[in-house]
Image (tube, helix red, strand yellow):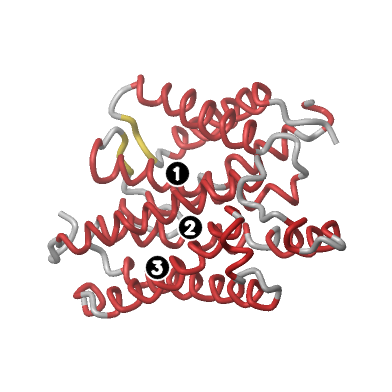
Amino acid sequence: MFGAHATTRGDRVHGAVMLTGVLLMCAYWVAFYLSDVTKPNVTAIDPTDPAAFLRVYMGFESAFPLADGFVAVSASLAIFYLAAKDAKAVLFGLVASGALMFLGLIDIYFNVLNGLYRPSRLWMDFGLQMEAAINVTCVLLSVVSVIRFWSHPLRRA
Amino acid sequence: MPSAVPLRCMLISIVLGVACELVSGRLQIWTYRNRATLVSNVILMFGVVQGLAIAGLVGGNWSLTDIAPLLFMLGGVVGLIYEGLNEFVVHNWSWSKTPLLGLTRSRDKAAVVGVAWGFAPVAVAVLARTPMLS
C-alpha cells in the first residue's frame, strides 16, 4: 500500500522522537508568548542594566519563530512520509535536521557570547537551564537524524 | 489595533471552513465518508482548534507580525497530524483523481493540505483584526 519498505522499529522510535521534539518546540513558543517561564532572570544576568539585556534577549529570541516553524513543519513532513514509507521522508528529514543544527548553533553561540552558560547562572535560573537543555537536544537530535536518514533504505528507493 | 477575541476567531474560522468545503465540493477535491465528518471538520478542526484555540487563545492580542509565524507553525503541525491520521489510520475522507497543484498521489495531496492548514489561523487572525469584522 505505501511502498516496498517496511516500517522498522527504529523508524517508529525515530518518528516518535521527532514528533515529541516538534510538539515540545510548539509548547516552548506558546509558553514564550503566553508566560515568562522560558525567559531567563535578567536581573541576575545584568544587575546594572537588566532592561537593556532584556531588549537584546527578546529581540534575538523573537527572530526565531519563523525559522523554528520551518523546522517544525519540515520535521512533521518527514514523520508523515516516514509513516508512508516514502523516500520524501529522507528529503524532509535532512532539511529539518540541517535547519535544526543551524538554529541550535546560532542559539548556542549567542549564549556563549553573553555568558549565559556560566555555572553560577545556570545553577539558579530555570529559564537558562531549559535553554541549555534545548541547545544540547537540538544538536544531538540533528546529528542522529542526519546519520539515520542518510543511511536509510528509502534514500536509495 | 482591535483585539482578536477567541469567539470571533472561532466564528470567522467556521466561515472559512464552510468556504473551503464549498470550493472543495464544487471542484471535487476530496469527498467525505459521511456528512458528520464534514460537519465536525468545519466545527471542530476549523472552528475550535484553528480558530478558537490557535488564532484566538494563542494569537490573543499580539500584533500580527509578532505572532503570525507561531500561528503558522501550530496550524501546520496540527494540520499535518490531522491529515496523517486520516491518510494512515481513520480514512474519513478521500482524495479524488483530480490533480491538486499538479499532485496526483493522495499522500502528497494530504501533505500539501496539511501544510496549508498553517495558513488557516494566520488568515483568521488577519480577518479578526480587520476593523470591518471587529
Asked if A32 appears above or below A59 in the picture, the reply is above
Which quadrant does the C terminus of chain B fall into?
Answer: top right
Which quadrant does the N terminus of chain B fall into?
Answer: top right
Is B43 in front, or is A66? A66
Query: Residue B19: percent from the left, percent from the top?
Result: 56, 31
Mark 1 sits on what residue? Answer: B79
Q: Are marks 1 and 2 in contact (CB under 8 Å)?
A: no
* Mark pair 3, 2: CA separation: 11 Å
Apparent side of residue B1 relative to residue A22 in the rendered image (left or right): right
Mark 2 sits on what residue? Answer: A72
Q: Quadrant of residue A5?
A: bottom left
Is B110 in front, or is B44? B44
Neighbor class of circle 3 (other Cα within 10 Å; few <14, some 14-19, many 20+) is many
Q: Of helix, strand and loop, which one carries label 1?
A: helix
* Mark pair 1, 2: CA separation: 12 Å
Q: Amino acid at mark 3?
A: Phe
Q: Of helix, strand and loop, which one carries label 3?
A: helix
Residue found at x 72% / y 35%: B127
Is A22 in front, or is B52? A22
Apparent side of residue B117 relative to residue A11 in the rendered image (left or right): right
Apparent side of residue A44 relative to residue A38 in the rendered image (left or right): right
Q: Chain of mark 3?
A: A
* Mark pair 1, 3: CA separation: 17 Å
Q: How many numbered badges does the structure rendering display?
A: 3
